[in-house]
Amino acid sequence: MAANEAFPGIGKIRYEGPDTKNMLAFRHYDADAIVEGLPMRDHFRFAVSWWHTFRGTGSDPFGAPTMIRPWERGGDSLEAALARVKVGFEFMEKLGVGFYCFHDRDVAPEGRDLAESNRNLDAVAAALRAEQERSGIRLLWGTANLFSHPRYVHGAATSCNAEVFAFAAAQVKKALETTHALGGAGYVFWGGREGYQCLWNTDMKREIDHLARFMHMAVEHAKKIGFTGQFYFEPKPREPTKHQYDYDCAACINFLRAHGLADHVKMNIETNHATLAGHEMQHELEYAGMQGFLGSIDANTGDTLLGWDTDQFPTDIYLTTRIMYTILKYGGLAPGGVNFDAKVRRESFEPVDLFHAHIGGMDAFARGLKIAAAMRADGALQRLVDERYASWSGPLGRRIESGSESMESLEREMLAKGDAAPCTSGRQELFENIVNTYL
Ligand code: XLS
Ligand code: NI
Ligand code: NI
């Protein structure tokens, strides 16, 4: 094997504990370690994203590609795509992740026409399937790239051009079938360009209705081919468009409910997209979780000093603690998982940086999980929250919550009392200090 390895000199990444000096080892992610009754590997279901890790070039709006990838022979040929499959699985096996995610056009090149694109995808899917069987690594979700090609300049499902909608439908049909053939656990809709740049030229109602029709067609096709994986909708408020219809969890869940899709689609929530929407990741998780729409997450982070989707690897323990606290609260992610929708910086151009990036992300999540589990086991935080809402467990609170009170009956009660009981302190600083005692 050694001679044709893509990552020579890097062996299997192992758990060595917090005191190890080896930076190519896990300090906290111990796949078999049991937390709240479940091995860490099953809490996370970590996935590598094909587009960033194996297709990221390091180019940005100001500069050329920088990534050193000795196995790349340049170009977007089918041969290169097939060779990349081996590289991808070598990387994932060495890293010890159980899953990956892809867009159709990341794994296989777009052909001269749809039929050739489909043939390319079939050829690569066969190679992916063989590597999946050999390694035991599985597909967390598949998706279609409906935003890179110039035909999608006005969007795909929300394009003003009906033939573009039709082409996108054909592309998603094939991506769904490929995901199904590879035993994928899910399928993601991310809008890409499903939004607008200018309202003067946009028929918003028509576009949003088309998006719903498109998703219904996908759900119907899934049923037809026997794909029982979970569908996800991934919110992102803007970029590349000025406004995207999948703005945040609130907008997405409203869309799903309004169009009869709520039983079929959950959320795939990305940290950097939450930031762009002006929310904390924890807010998005909580909002989706409380309504039963928490599906899967795209793990990354942004930079508060940069206003775009920088897709950095998450290393902030406070962030991962908040994420895992909320995920544990809502019973976990499976059949979803933690997909590193993250890319190494343009300046981190050596192959080994791909390992450092993923190891850091996995360790940050493992620490977040352990801290969140300790917080939950201890219960101090939850006791304080319960105390804060104690009046809702008293007779009046229970009567209101159960629906047996009216404005008239409450008016009677308050006229008799004269005023409400005084409020207690919110104690935000105390809460924050308690959280810090676990870090
Ligand atoms: C882009 C999105 C994309 C989706 C998959 O910002 O995060 O990578 O996760 O289409
Ligand atoms: Ni994403
Ligand atoms: Ni993103």
Image (cartoon, grey):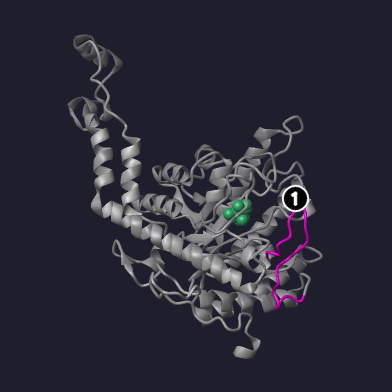
Which of these two is toward me, 277 or 264?
A: 277
For residue 407, above or below residue 328? above
Residue 93's x, y, as percent? Answer: 52, 77
Residue 26's x, y, as percent? Answer: 44, 71
Q: Which residues are magenta?
A: 56-73
Badge 1 marks a residue whose secondary structure is helix
For residue 85, above or below residue 241? below
Q: Residues within 10 Å of mark 1 (few under 14, many from 20)?
A: many
Q: Quadrant of residue 126?
A: bottom right
Residue displayed at 70% across by 78% down: 71
**Considering the image in quadrants, where does the C terminus appear?**
bottom left
Residue displayed at 51% across by 40% down: 279
Q: Residue furthest right?
A: 112
Q: Is residue 13 visible?
A: yes
Q: Is residue 3 left or right of residue 319?
A: right
**Is most of the magenta stretch helix, strand or loop?**
loop
